[in-house]
């Protein structure tokens, strides 16, 4: 089947045009052209995972660093971590890749099914105004005491990596489609939260380190809803563990969150029923209780 002439011309232009023009055609803002050209040159002999060398992927590393050298170091560190953590294997064990290039949670092994069933976050079947993916986390659904008791953090960290990678790939697919950098959005339902969470914060620091170092500029907003009055105490501790570029995107609101979500381009009807929406397929409708001995026989 013949390719449309316009597409052939565009493809030839991308191949033969100066790099700056090619970057512009791929959606990179002009102010980043010089830095991205230099970063691409510095990385040209490095072996990166598929898609990691795309201009719109590398742009995420430039937007949250001060220099090209810092961005290069961050890319290489993230690449080394991806191989050490076996991200590709995690995605295969915990999910399925759709025809559109995005993933869905579909655990295959016993340990994957156990971990996925206890993980209090999910990607919603909707997008924000830019077309970016939306992740929802719910404090009330997380049995932090049980997770700590059974020492399940290393296992559940795999689901966390799956969620981050899923968000990244979904945002990248939309970035390619729209020819501009697309971010995801995160909603955190803080209802049911208590100060007891502070005793578990250190156990989740490795998770936050992964988010900070290996998934830069992933979201455009993190909206904490149903935040209790004492959340400021919790935030004063947790915020110290989050990268400044992510921390500045956090909004904290109470029960009057609908207008804030609408401004972010969220479809309120696509929210789970417990948040006033119509989505009935959420796994987070109740507490995901960790039974005693949950880790027995699992390869953590």
Image (tube, rainbow, N blue to C red):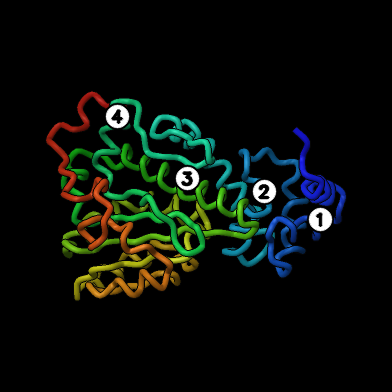
Pointer 1 or 3: first along the chain: 1
Question: Where does label 3 land, which residue?
Answer: 165
**Image spot of residue 193 (x, y percent):** 18, 62
Q: How many marks?
A: 4
Residue at 45 percent of width and 54 percent of height: 133
Question: Where does label 2 land, which residue?
Answer: 54
Q: Nearer the viewer, residue 261 or 110?
A: 261
Residue at 12 percent of width and 35 percent of height: 292
| Mark 2 neighbour class, 10 Å CA radius: few under 14, some 14 to 19, many 20 or more | some
Mark 4 in CB contact with mark 1 (< 8 angstroms): no
Label annotation for residue 111? 4
Mark 2 in CB contact with mark 4 (< 8 angstroms): no
Horizontal side of 136 relative to 3 (left or right) equals left
Pointer 4 or 1: first along the chain: 1
Residue at 46 percent of width and 50 percent of height: 167
Q: Nearer the viewer, residue 183 or 52?
A: 183
Disc 4 to disc 3, how far (Cα)?
19 Å
**Image spot of residue 159 (x, y percent):** 36, 41
**Image spot of residue 182 (x, y percent):** 55, 59
Instruction: Let me know if residue 176 appears in the view.
Output: yes
Residue at 23 percent of width and 24 percent of height: 297
Q: Secondary structure at mark 1?
A: helix
Quadrant for the C terminus in the image: top left
Q: Nearer the viewer, residue 262 or 181?
A: 262
Disc 2 to disc 3, how far (Cα)?
16 Å
Question: Where does label 1 land, which residue?
Answer: 19
Q: Secondary structure at mark 4?
A: helix
Q: Secondary structure at mark 3?
A: helix
């Amino acid at each position: 089947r013949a390719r449309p002439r316009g597409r052939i011309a565009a493809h030839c232009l991308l191949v033969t045009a100066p790099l700056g023009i090619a970057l512009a055609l791929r959606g990179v803002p002009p102010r980043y052209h010089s830095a991205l050209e230099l970063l691409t040159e510095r990385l040209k002999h490095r072996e990166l995972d598929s898609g990691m060398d795309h201009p719109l992927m590398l742009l995420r590393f430039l937007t949250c660093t001060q220099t090209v050298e810092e961005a290069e170091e961050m890319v290489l560190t993230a690449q080394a971590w991806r191989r050490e953590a076996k991200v590709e294997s995690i995605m295969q064990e915990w999910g399925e890749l759709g025809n559109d290039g995005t993933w869905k949670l579909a655990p295959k092994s016993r340990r994957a099914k156990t971990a996925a069933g206890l993980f209090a976050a999910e990607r919603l079947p909707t997008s924000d105004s830019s077309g970016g993916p939306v992740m929802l986390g719910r404090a009330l659904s997380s049995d932090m005491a049980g997770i700590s008791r059974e020492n399940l953090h290393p296992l559940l960290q795999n689901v966390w990596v799956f969620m981050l990678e899923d968000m990244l790939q979904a945002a990248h697919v939309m970035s390619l489609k729209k020819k501009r950098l697309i971010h995801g959005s995160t909603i955190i339902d803080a209802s049911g939260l208590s100060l007891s969470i502070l005793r578990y914060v250190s156990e989740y620091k490795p998770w936050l380190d992964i988010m900070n170092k290996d998934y830069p500029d992933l979201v455009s907003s993190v909206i904490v809803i149903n935040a209790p009055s004492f959340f400021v105490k919790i935030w004063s501790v947790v915020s110290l563990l989050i990268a400044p570029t992510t921390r500045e995107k956090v909004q904290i609101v109470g029960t009057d969150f609908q207008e804030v979500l609408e401004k972010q381009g969220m479809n309120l009807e696509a929210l789970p029923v417990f948040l006033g929406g119509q989505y009935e397929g959420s796994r987070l409708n109740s507490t995901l209780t960790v039974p005693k001995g949950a880790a027995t026989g699992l390869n953590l």
